[in-house]
Image (cartoon, rainbow, N blue to C red):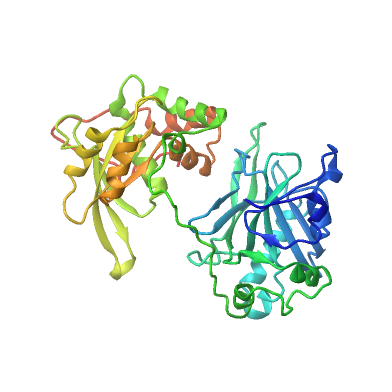
Amino acid sequence: MQIVPFSEVCNTDLQVDAIYQGKRRGNAGDDPLPRMLKVSNSGGFRYRGSIRSGLHLVVLTSTLKDLDWPDMLDPETGVYTYYGDNKKPRSLDKTPRKGNELLKRIFNLAHSGVEGRRQVPPILLFANTGEWRDVVFLGLAVPGTSNLRASEDLVAVWRISKEGKRFENYRARFTVLKVSLLKRAWITDIIDGHTHSSNAPQNWTDWVETGRIRPLQATRSIEYRTKAEQLPQTPGDRKILERLRRYFASDHYKFEPCAAELARLLLPNIANMNLTRPVRDGGRDATGKFRIGSGASEILVDFALEAKCYGPDNGVGVRDMSRLISRLRHRQFGILVTTSYVNTQAYKEIKEDRHPVIVIAGADIVELLKKKGYTDPIAVRTWLEQGFADSARLDDSRTHPIAHRKTSL
C-alpha cells in the first residue's frame, strides 16, 4: 500500500487505495485534503465552486463506520453508497453545508443528457483511515449505476431520531470508474477551472460524452472467507447478532422464518418461499423460486434454504453443508443462513467443487439489518418482535408459506 507523507500530498498523483497522511499536531490543520485539493478542512461534503452557478470539484469523505448511516464501497461491483448530511429532524434540503442540495443537483445533471453531464464535477471519494487525519483514496466516481433507473439512484429514506421524530435523508448510489490513477496535471486543471482538459481520464470523458459507465471492479482473490471475515468484528455489530441469537435461543426452529426473510433482503427477486416440516425436512428448511428477468421473459429457478442458529464458536461443518448440497437437484441452488460461520474445510469444498450455495453468515446478517435501518440491538429486537413473535411451526402435514409474509421489513 502506497503511503504519501503530508509534505508531498500537494504534488503527487492520486492513486486508488493509496494513503495520504496529514500532519501530527492534533488539530483541524492536520487535514491533508485542503493542501492536496484546495477544499475546506471539515465535513463529509467539500467542494470547489458554487452549487447553483457551477461546481468544479466535489470531495466526499466518510469514516465508513457510522452505524446509523452506513456508507460503503462494494469493491466487486464498484458501487459506492453514500448518505446525505440531514442526520437530525429538519427539512431534507436545509442542511448547514448544503450536502443534500448538492446531491440533488449533481444527480439531476447526470440524468440530463450530455449537456447535463458536462456540468457534473469530478467526484473524488476518500475514507478516513482512523490514524490521525490520514485518508485513503477510494476513486473517481460518477452519479448513478448501470443497473439502476434514474429514479432509484438517489432516494429519500426515513429514519427516527432518538426523540422519536421522523425525518428524511438522501441515500445516493455512485459508481467508481475504472481509473486507477489521477494525474496531478488534471487535478491542477480542475483547480484552475479547466475540468474537461486533455489530462482528463478517458473513462471519465467517455461517461461525459456517452453516459457509459465503466466501473472499477475487483474480483475476490480468495473465494472462501475465513472465520473472522464471516463474523462481526466490532462490539456494536456483535451485540446486534447476539440479540438475534438470543431471541431464538429457546427454539431454533423459529429462526427459520427469520432466515427466510434475511434471504429476501439479500435476494429481492425471490418469487415465493415455503417453510418445510420441522422433522424429516429432507435437508431443507425452506424451498422456493427465484425470479430471473421480468414479464414474459422471466424464468423461475428452484432453490433450497437451510437455517442454522449457532453460537459464534459453533461453525457449520462439512456434515451440515453436505446435507444441503445432497438435496439440491439439477439446476437448483442452495442458501445457507447461519448466525455463526462456515468452517474452512466446508467453505473450501463448496468453492472448489463449485457447488451453487450462497452463504449468509453472521457478519452478512448484521450488514443486511443495518442496511434496512436496524443499526442497534434495540432496533433489531423491535424488528424481531414485530415480525416473528408468532413464528411457531405448523403441524407436519403442511408447509408454511411465507411468500407474502408481512413484517416490518
Which residue appears at 60% of the width and 73% of the height? 203
- Compare residues 144 and 230 and report the one nearer the observer: 230
Asked if one can make out residue 351 in the rendered structure from this viewpoint, the answer is yes
- Position in image of residue 208 (x %, y %): 63, 76
- Compare residues 186 and 250 and report the one nearer the observer: 186
Which residue appears at 38% of the width and 34% of the height? 341
Residue 307 as seen in the image, left or right of residue 361: left
For residue 111, above or below residue 227: below
- Position in image of residue 121 (x %, y %): 72, 68
Asked if one can make out residue 85 in the rendered structure from this viewpoint, the answer is no
- Position in image of residue 304 (x %, y %): 24, 45
Residue 8 as seen in the image, left or right of residue 88: right
Where the C terminus falls, by quadrant? Answer: top left
For residue 158, above or below residue 231: below
Where residue 39 sits, quadrant-wise, is bottom right
- Compare residues 86 and 343 and report the one nearer the observer: 343
Where residue 184 sits, quadrant-wise, is bottom right
Where residue 204 sits, quadrant-wise, is bottom right
